[in-house]
Amino acid sequence: MRYSLLLMLLLAPSVVSAQTGTAINLGGGITTFSDSTGTTGTIMDLGGGMRTYSDSSGRTGVITDLGGGVSTYNINPPARIATAAPRSGGHDLGNLTVNPYAPDSLANPYGAGSQFKADGLNNPYSEYGSQFSNKSPNNPFATDAPKLYDQQGNYRGRLGGNPYGPDSTSNPYGRYGSQFSPDSINNPYGAGNRFAPDSPKNPYGLGWKVEGSK
């Protein structure tokens, strides 16, 4: 089907020259789309008149149907990720992703997620998996938990259970842990959007690199 110019401008306001687009209904409330500039994305129907939106440029948001053919659009611009903390070149511990088939995935019990891996995060006896190690995300008091980097090398906080660490993904008030922060994996409409190609919540993606201190 074809998008109207109005809908295209609402969903992708930066591509004002794109007057048409193509959408494919995959079923299950999921629709993928593309436009003439190469922007692609996904719209998922959550029910109750709410749909989530994400595209390849990093925009995410929510579309709410008010009835009577009226909808509101709350589309966020791509998150600006600080690169003040460059990739440290630390010890590679695998990738944070829910994809269980990627060999580097911490969700792969036969790969990086193995409980028998000498430096594995899922090994309760390893330096990076022990609940007593200051380098382990399993230690709620750790101050040197592994760092996270996306596939572009941008810093994404520290993986850990320390709710007081300023960069911790478990800090509900921090940039990388708050469910309201666009940079947090706990925000299903931000970095935690399971349809975003680079998100750790995407079951088909590569996720983020996990690096421990050497």
Image (tube, rainbow, N blue to C red):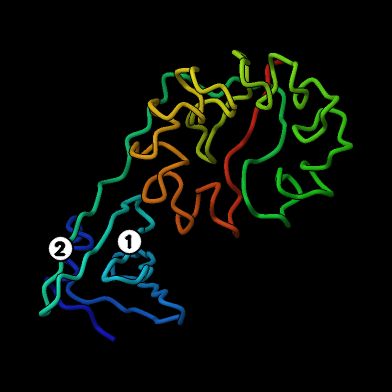
- Real-space CA distance between mark 2 and mark 1, rounded to the nearest whole angstrom: 12 Å
Task: Find residue 153 and name its label.
Answer: none
Place of residue 48 in the rendered image (x, y in percent of width and height, measured from the top left): 29, 70
As helix, strand or loop, the secondary structure at mark 1 comes to strand
Residue plotted at (79% across, 32% down): 120
Other-residue count near label 1 (Cα within 10 Å), few / some / many at <14 / 14–19 / ≥20: many
Side of 106 where 5 appears, left or right = left
- The quarter of the image holding the C terminus is top right
Q: Is residue 177 above or below residue 6?
A: above
Other-residue count near label 2 (Cα within 10 Å), few / some / many at <14 / 14–19 / ≥20: few
Q: Which mark lies nearer to you, 2 or 1?
A: 2
Place of residue 57 in the rendered image (x, y in percent of width and height, measured from the top left): 34, 52
State the count of labels: 2
| Image quadrant in which you'd find residue 11 | bottom left
The earlier-in-sequence mark between 2 and 1 is 1
Residue plotted at (13% across, 73% down): 5
Side of 36 where 32 appears, left or right = right
Place of residue 140 in the rendered image (x, y in percent of width and height, measured from the top left): 62, 21
Q: Amino acid at mark 1?
A: Tyr
Proximity of marks 2 and 1: CB atoms separated by less than 8 Å: no
Task: Find residue 53 and name its label.
Answer: 1
Residue plotted at (75% across, 16% down): 132
Q: Is residue 178 above or below residue 197?
A: above
As helix, strand or loop, the secondary structure at mark 2 comes to strand
Q: Amino acid at mark 2?
A: Thr
Q: Is residue 80 above or below residue 99?
A: above
- The quarter of the image holding the N terminus is bottom left
Q: Which residue is mark 2?
A: 72
